[in-house]
Image (spheres, grey):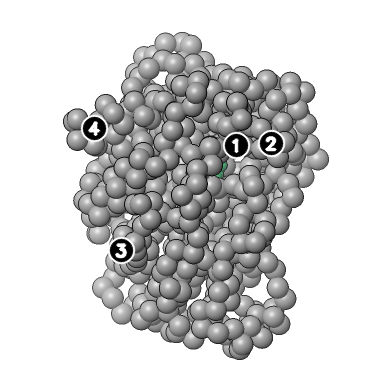
């Protein structure tokens, strides 16, 4: 994760969402006694101060930050069968005849998923990730004591690929061993996109109650993070039981900002990436509190003044003002934009506020950040208080797919324009792969000092099995059916097999510009949730997880479009 260096993420800092290859140093981890002391002395809303949520510092909240007691409201039951009948396509498609090459390629990707899962199961089941070189598990400190990130992230991919036995193994682990009774500091964003997103998708795909109840229980544990003066959540939350009287867990239910984030600010891509999951938590529980929390962030962002229409990455949850003018469609900003257009799609095109925010943001991005290199490659630069940094992160490569998805719903005269922009950005990201020796792309690539779509710094040459480039190939394929996207996806499959597959799983590599790269010994959970899922879908018919029925959260977990209300 980002280093605390004067409040600014270190160069090469990544988009929130994944473990760094090395060295991990995410959370400030103070002793419990420190929590109690800070609680007494930290001023209300002091920058970077821990926020004690039980004291009612936030906007009108129940004192505990917990949702209103369910018993006081009409009994609610989500009608799963009715929901299933509302889908326009069977979730795993109708499987019409297809050409043997496409099928063979899809089967190869399925085999890769089985290999990744089997090795995780053998060496690391119950840990968060597999370390494929040392054949053991990794726990890390992003998930506040929660375990099994790979299990939860893999569930829907296993299901979609019809890896039935493996899906049952994963489900059994969730039923028997997934313990929510933990007491540690977690990233609100990571827990939401991986665990809540993974559980919700597994429930919607299968109707298995265990996934729903775990998602709701975990969702409630996240609510105290929103108890701030603005309702914008802080980035880190203690997942312990919210009982202030307990001398054993004095930090429980408290939330605070990342140590490296400017002046106690919250991160745009973190608090702006909750909407999809939180709306579904309300949909399934009948409890509006989740949707209300997520909507508050949207409201605050809609109202705040934006420099030249752009959204900076750091905002104070105390004042609701921007803390620093760094704008990026890559790390720290990215999935906020993604969730605007997807919120609108998921609302069955009813959330017009989200759509307008997306349209306006994209217009500002195009005006100020989209550039063309001397060699004719279109890219999206970063912006630091008006000065452009001619760099694109791997994380920013999701934007080709996002812009294509939005283009579908732009007015007729703008549609082709946005499809062209999406195709150009996806092409640039493909170039970042094609220009490397491994045919895998670096963490960041630049367009300055004579460089075109290549990393210029040693620290940016790594590849950690990230999905964003194949994510854009998948959307571009679905929306254009240009065969080059399948071809490009297949190049990635071959490169993964050649450079990332090791004896016991898949590993990231430290340098994409050498044909004999060293491995980082980490099989990220998003490799199973996203990279392999998007590759598989690239070789499926369009009715498998159809875009008519589903939106993918930022961890590639499919959540249904709300065609109707399924209260029983
Ligand atoms: C994933 O966890 C998600 O895509 C997140 O939004 C950002 N990064 C990783 C993958 O690179």
- Percent across and percent down for residue 23 are 74, 50
- Percent across and percent down for residue 159 are 48, 38
Q: Which residue is mark 1?
A: 444
Q: Earlier in the sequence, mark 3 or mark 1?
A: 3
Q: Could you tell me how far apart the alpha carbons at marks 4 and 2 are, in whole angstroms?
A: 37 Å
Q: Is residue 167 above or below residue 194?
A: above
Q: Which residue is mark 3?
A: 303
Q: Which residue is mark 4?
A: 414
Q: What is the tally of numbered marks visible in this picture?
A: 4
Residues at marks 4 and 2 touching, judged by CB atoms closer than 8 Å:
no
Q: Is mark 4 within 8 Å of ligand 1?
A: no
226 lies left or right of 347? right
Q: Is residue 300 above or below residue 414?
A: below
Helix, strand or loop for disc 4: helix
Q: Earlier in the sequence, mark 4 or mark 3?
A: 3
Residue name at image x 42 percent, y 77 percent = 229
Q: Earlier in the sequence, mark 1 or mark 4?
A: 4
Residues at marks 3 and 2 touching, judged by CB atoms closer than 8 Å:
no
- Percent across and percent down for residue 315 are 46, 63
Q: Could you tell me how far apart the alpha carbons at marks 2 and 1 are, in whole angstroms?
A: 9 Å
């Amino acid at each position: 994760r980002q280093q605390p260096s004067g409040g600014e993420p270190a160069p090469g800092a990544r988009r929130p969402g994944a473990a760094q290859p090395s060295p991990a140093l995410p959370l400030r981890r103070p002793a419990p006694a420190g929590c109690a002391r800070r609680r007494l002395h930290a001023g209300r809303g002091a920058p970077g101060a821990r926020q004690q949520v039980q004291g009612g510092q936030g906007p009108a909240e129940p004192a505990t930050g917990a949702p209103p007691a369910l018993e006081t409201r009409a009994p609610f039951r989500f009608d799963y069968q009715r929901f299933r009948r509302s889908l326009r396509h069977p979730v795993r498609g109708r499987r019409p005849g297809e050409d043997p090459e496409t099928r063979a390629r899809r089967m190869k990707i399925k085999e890769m998923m089985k290999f990744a899962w089997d090795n995780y199961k053998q060496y690391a089941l119950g840990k968060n990730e597999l370390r494929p070189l040392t054949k053991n598990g990794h726990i890390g400190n992003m998930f506040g004591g929660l375990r099994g990130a790979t299990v939860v992230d893999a569930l829907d991919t296993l299901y979609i690929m019809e890896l039935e036995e493996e899906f049952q193994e994963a489900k059994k682990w969730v039923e028997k061993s997934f313990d929510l009774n933990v007491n540690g500091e977690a990233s609100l964003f990571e827990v939401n996109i991986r665990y809540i997103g993974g559980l919700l998708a597994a429930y919607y795909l299968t109707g298995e109650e265990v996934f729903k109840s775990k998602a709701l229980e975990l969702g409630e544990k996240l609510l105290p993070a929103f108890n701030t003066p603005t309702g914008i959540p802080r980035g880190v939350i203690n997942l312990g039981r919210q009982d202030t009287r307990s001398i054993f867990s004095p930090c429980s239910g408290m939330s605070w900002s990342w140590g490296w984030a400017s002046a106690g600010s919250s991160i745009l891509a973190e608090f702006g990436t909750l909407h999809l999951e939180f709306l579904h938590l309300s949909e399934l529980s009948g409890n509006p509190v989740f949707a209300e929390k997520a909507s508050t962030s949207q409201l605050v962002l809609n109202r705040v003044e934006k420099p030249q229409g752009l959204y900076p990455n750091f905002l104070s949850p105390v004042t609701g003002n921007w803390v620093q003018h760094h704008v990026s469609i890559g790390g720290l900003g990215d999935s906020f934009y993604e969730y605007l257009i997807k919120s609108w799609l998921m609302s069955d095109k009813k959330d017009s506020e989200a759509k307008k925010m997306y349209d306006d943001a994209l217009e500002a991005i195009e005006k100020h950040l989209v550039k063309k290199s001397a060699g004719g490659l279109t890219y999206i630069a970063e912006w630091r208080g008006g000065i452009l940094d001619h760099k694109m992160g791997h994380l920013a490569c999701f934007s080709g797919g996002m812009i294509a998805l939005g283009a579908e719903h732009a007015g007729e005269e703008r549609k082709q324009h946005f499809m062209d922009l999406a195709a150009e950005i996806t092409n640039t990201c493909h170039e970042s792969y094609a220009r490397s020796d491994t045919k895998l792309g670096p963490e960041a690539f630049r367009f300055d000092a004579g460089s075109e779509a290549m990393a210029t710094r040693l620290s940016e040459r790594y590849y950690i099995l990230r999905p964003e480039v194949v994510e854009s190939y998948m959307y571009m394929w679905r929306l254009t059916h240009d065969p080059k996207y399948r071809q490009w996806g297949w190049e990635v499959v071959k490169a993964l097999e050649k450079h990332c597959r090791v004896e016991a799983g898949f590993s990231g590599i430290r340098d994409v510009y050498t044909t004999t790269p060293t491995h980082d010994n980490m099989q990220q959970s998003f490799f199973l949730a996203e990279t392999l899922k998007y590759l598989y879908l690239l070789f499926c018919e369009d009715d498998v997880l159809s875009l008519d029925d589903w939106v993918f959260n930022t961890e590639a977990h499919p959540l249904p479009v709300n065609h109707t209300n399924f209260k029983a």
